[in-house]
Every structure is written in C-alpha cells, then in structure tokens.
Amino acid sequence: AVQGPRAQADRELYRDAMLRELQAYPGLELYEASVEDLVVDEPAEGSAAAAAAAEAGRPVGRACGVITADGSELRARAVVLTTGTFLRGVVHVGRESRPAGRFVSTSEAVEPPSTGLAATLGRLALPLDRLKTGTPPRLSAQSIDFSRLEPQPSEEPPLPFSFLNEGESVAQAANLITCHKTYTNAETHRIVVDSKHTLPAYESGDGKGAGPRYCPSLFSKVERFPEREAHIVWLEPEGLDSDWVYPNGISSAFPPDVQLRLVRSMVGLEGATILKPAYDVEYDYVDPTCLRRTLEVSTVEGLFLAGQIIGTTGYEEAAALGLVAGANAALSCSRGPPLTVGRHQGYIGVLVDDLVTRGTTEPYRMFTSRAEWRLMLRADNADA
C-alpha cells in the first residue's frame, strides 16, 4: 500500500485565484457562452472520400470550432470538450426529475443541459451511453453540534504535494481547517430501507443507473452491506468563511423530507439544517476507447475530450485529463510532439491507458491500487 495525499481547498478562493491567473495570462482571451454545437469539416455522407477515410482508419472529419447559443461561431484548429454532467443531463430529487446539468449552488434554479452537443456527437457516430452520479445535501455549520463529534484536524505543518515547494509553506497554512466525523446508525439504515420506493427511477441500469462504485450512494451502501451497523460520514467545511458543510458519504436523492430525517438521525446532526438538498444527475458520456492516448477522438481530427464526458468522476481524474487534452490540443496546432505519459511514469499514464484501452461502464476513479508501478509513483518520490 502507498499513501495518496489529499488537500481540501476553499472553493471560492480557488475559483477566484484561477480566474485571476487566466485573466492575466498573456495572449489568452476568455469568452463566456453556452456551446450548443460543433463546427466539423467532414466529407459528405456516403461520398468516396468518406468511404476511403473510414476504410483506411483515418479521421473522417476535422473539428473547426464551436457554435454558441446566440449563434456566434468561434473558429479554432482544435477543440476540447469538458462537458461535465451536462450532456443531455437530467437531475433527480426523489421522483421529481427535470432536464439540467446541475443545480445552481445558491438557489433552487438549475443550469440547462447540453442537448445540441449530444446530438452532434451522436451524428459523428461516437459511442454514447449513460452514467449517473450524486451529491450529498449541504448542511449549515451553525446547526451542527460539533462538541459531540470526533475532530479530524489538518496535518500540521501542511505537506506540499511537490518538492518544488520544499522548504516553503503552502497557501493558507495559517488557516488550516478541522473536519469532523459522525456515523450512520440503525435508525438511519431503517429510514433508507423504508424509503427505497421514493428514490428516482433512472433511464439506465434497470432502474438503478450506472453510478460510482467507489463513491456509492448511502442507499447503495446500506443495500450492499446489510451486515454493517454504521458508515462513516465526514463533515467537511466548504470554505474558510462559509457556513456550508459537505457531509461526505450520504449522497442519495431521496425527497427533501426523507433527507432531513436521515441527517437528523445521526449523532451531532439532530438539529441540522439542510441548505441544499442532495440530488442525482444522469448524463451522456462517450466510450473512451474511441480516443487516442492524446485524448483526441480517433475519427475526428482536432477534437479532444476530457473529464466526465469520457466516463470519469469530476474530481482529480477530470483535472488530470483536462491537462492532457489541453496540452495535446495546443501541441497539435503547433505541430509539436504529443504529450503522453506511460503507466510507469505517472498516475496520469495509468488513468489514460485504462480509459482508452479498457473503457469504463461506471464513473472511473484513479486508485493507487490500479498502478502496478505504484511503489515508484508514490508521492514522496514522484519528482525524483
């Protein structure tokens, strides 16, 4: 076994810091709009050129840009799609469902799904399927009795991820947070079992959806492990100055009233207030076996995919894939050699190799146990 260091970042501070970095980057222009379609230069269907390209295994089209919701056309020599959960997305809370990619964090509004892009990817004959994922309710820190919970303080002094920071501190080192731990119990599990009929009915997976095996919903854990008397719930602050707490481990899209009973059945949460109910989202993804190791679509030159659109979770996996796809999109424009990482060189190499050679039928998570070279890839000598 090897360790995999983890850090939590203030969402707002991280977003603002990255936005400032992008805005200050020389030669980079930011354009905010909803992308509805791709511009693809492709031979006419049934033409000799299309048949010859398909027979030779060459790309049958080239991505030339995107079309936004207002009809604007942005031309480009390479396009990277990172659609998250928005491709024909549907959000579920209990038996209520509506088209959306996700809920807006600060209101009951939803962000609309991307249906045009999904149709275009289907027209390009990319292999599409459905996945689902979920997010837990958000709780008010002021409503939690932390005196009854087990504290989980940050490591002090904090350990940087890279030796590039050796001998230096890390951002926010003076503002380290403390998480807390509670547990589900027999009453929690009774509510879960008794409320099974109120859960969403999904399009995929015979009513259960193809959800993440390694970050399962509370219902999945109770159903799979009936012998377990309790499951850990980590209470994680979402920000340094935020009242929002993320209860890691209890995602399940029960109706809001059931969610409240579940939460309040746990020690320390008897008086908890839910600021945002849990929900599930079901969405299209592209089978990643249609990609090259550069994350370019093998049949559409200049089109790169990264993140949940190719079957991973939206966490570290999506960030790593975005790095690979973005770098290779830029390198393809400059005619530079592609960026590829071997399985023996880094976890990114394991991640990409697993996806493009084996594919996935559930949201993929990168574990140290997937890497046969993990003793060499471990964090304490990764920079060697």
Image (cartoon, helix red, strand yellow):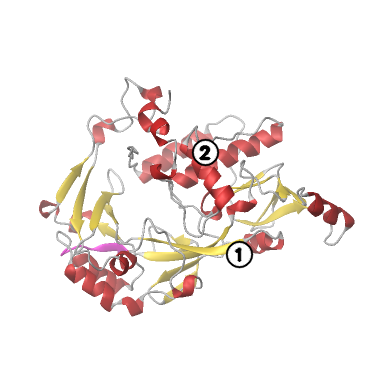
**Helix or strand or loop: what does disc 2 sit on?**
helix
Q: Position of residue 306 (x, y in %)?
A: 56, 48
| 46 relative to 168 in the view: left or right | right
Q: Count neighbours of disc 2 (C-alpha within 10 A) and say few if under 14, some if 14 to 19, many if 20 or more.
A: some
Kindly identify which numbered label has been placed on residue 349.
2
Q: Position of residue 337 (x, y in %)?
A: 67, 30
Disc 1 marks a residue whose amino acid type is Thr
Regarding residue 42, the answer to whether it shows in the image is: no
**Helix or strand or loop: what does disc 1 sit on?**
helix
**Where are the magenta residues, as a range?**
270-277
Q: Is residue 305 magenta?
A: no
| 90 relative to 178 in the view: left or right | right
Q: Is residue 271 magenta?
A: yes
> Which residue, as the protein is rendered here, is positioned at the far left?
147
Residues 372 and 136: in front is 372
Q: Earlier in the sequence, mark 1 or mark 2?
A: 1
Residue 379 position (above or below residue 98): above
Q: Nearer the viewer, mark 1 or mark 2?
A: 2
Regarding residue 14, the answer to whether it shows in the image is: yes
Look at 85% across and 52% down and name the residue there. 52
Where residue 71 sits, quadrant-wise, is bottom right
Kindly identify which numbered label has been placed on residue 115.
1
Magenta-drawn stretch, dominant element (helix, strand or loop): loop
Mark 1 vs mark 2, CA separation in Å: 31 Å
| 146 relative to 66 in the view: left or right | left
| The N terminus, quarter of image | top left
Q: Position of residue 49 (x, y in %)?
A: 86, 53
Q: Position of residue 3 (x, y in %)?
A: 32, 37
Residue 49 position (above or below residue 5): below
